[in-house]
Amino acid sequence: METVVSGIRSTGNLHLGNYFGALKNFLRMQHENHCYFFIADYHSLTTHPTPEDLHGSSKQVLVEYLAAGLDPEIVTIYMQSDIPEIPELYLLLNMNAYKGELERCTSFKEKIRNQTENINAGLLTYPVLMAADVLIHRATKVPVGKDQEQHLEMMRTFVARFNRMYKTEYFPEPLAYNFGEQLIKIPGLDGSGKMGKSEGNGIFLADDPAAIRKKVMRAVTDSGPLTPGQEMSEPVRNLFTIMQVVSTPETISHFREKFDHAEIRYGDLKQQLAEDIIAFTSPIREKILQISADNNYLKKVARQGAEKARESASKTIREVRQIIGFKSF
């Protein structure tokens, strides 16, 4: 059984794009591998160094992942900041990470263009902290998106360098986790691109029915097909894409036929789509409300996760310190 580590952003609510993207595969993965899922509250400080409510944001993310189906009895789910061994390994790995290779990282270049007033050391060494998150459990697999592939390659570089410098084979070189299928990309409601929080075009799992109806009814479309068989515009195609994951085949077929015959009324399509999204998200939203109100359960989950994660992490740090040469007097 493979050991898999994946980080979960500590800012932002889960939306349909998250659910049908990585999260759906996490739910399957938890039954097939030895999984560690951490809420990346340290990482969040690289772009939000003075968060309004760091604890509240992290709590909400924990609640929503539990409500969506992550089972804390099967996986180890924990707060990154609850594991002091992670920053220690981060420090040790930083000694063998070079300024030039970190500055060439694509994500670093993008970040310093976008946040010119906050070019901090954490941005530069972000790939090292990501490596520490994974290597602290000596993981062999990491679920990564396209934007994280370079970080994984850097992680493999750090591993090879550590093993070579200290004449050991201690750390395995982690590979990308292959889900065996292409992730579903859920578009936003603004007519282009993918669904996301920062874009303001998302349907969140915690949204109540009124909010969902309002968002969907305001979704971008076009003036409608003028002739039968007309090609579908991107904004309308986006709505049909969302419909494919929340609606019945009969519903999709009905509106597709209306479009093909130039008889479609987008208001009717949006009303149906809104109700189908509500039907899909309501059970998850009910669990979110239930779990959010149970602080004792959340404390238990966080404590249990930290204990399991530290059992693995402390073993790694103890052995790494021995490899490097640290000894107590």
Image (tube, rainbow, N blue to C red):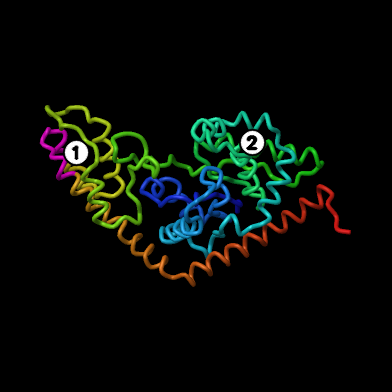
Q: Looking at the image, is 15 positioned above or below residue 119?
A: below
Residue at which label 1 appears: 256
Q: Position of residue 159 (x, y in %)?
A: 70, 40
Residues in magenta, as a range: 256-269
Q: Nearer the viewer, residue 104 or 67?
A: 104
Q: Nearer the viewer, residue 261 or 238?
A: 238
Residue count near mark 2 (Cα–Cα under 10 Å), binned few <14, some 14–19, many ≥20: some
Horizontal placement of 174 versus 315: left or right? left
SS type, badge 1: helix
SS type, badge 2: helix
Q: At x 71% / y 43%, what residue is drawn?
A: 93
Q: Farthest residue in the front direction?
A: 117
Label 2 or label 1, whichever comes before in sequence order: 2
Which circle, 2 or 1, is nearer the viewer? Answer: 2
What amino acid type is highlighted by mark number 2? Met
Q: At x 22% / y 53%, what residue is drawn?
A: 275
Q: Quadrant of the C terminus?
A: bottom right
Q: Looking at the image, is 109 positioned above or below residue 44?
A: above
The numbered dot on residue 154 is 2
Q: Position of residue 325 (x, y in %)?
A: 84, 49
What amino acid type is highlighted by mark number 1? Arg
Q: At x 53% / y 66%, what residue is drawn?
A: 301
Q: Is residue 282 magenta?
A: no
The numbered dot on residue 271 is none
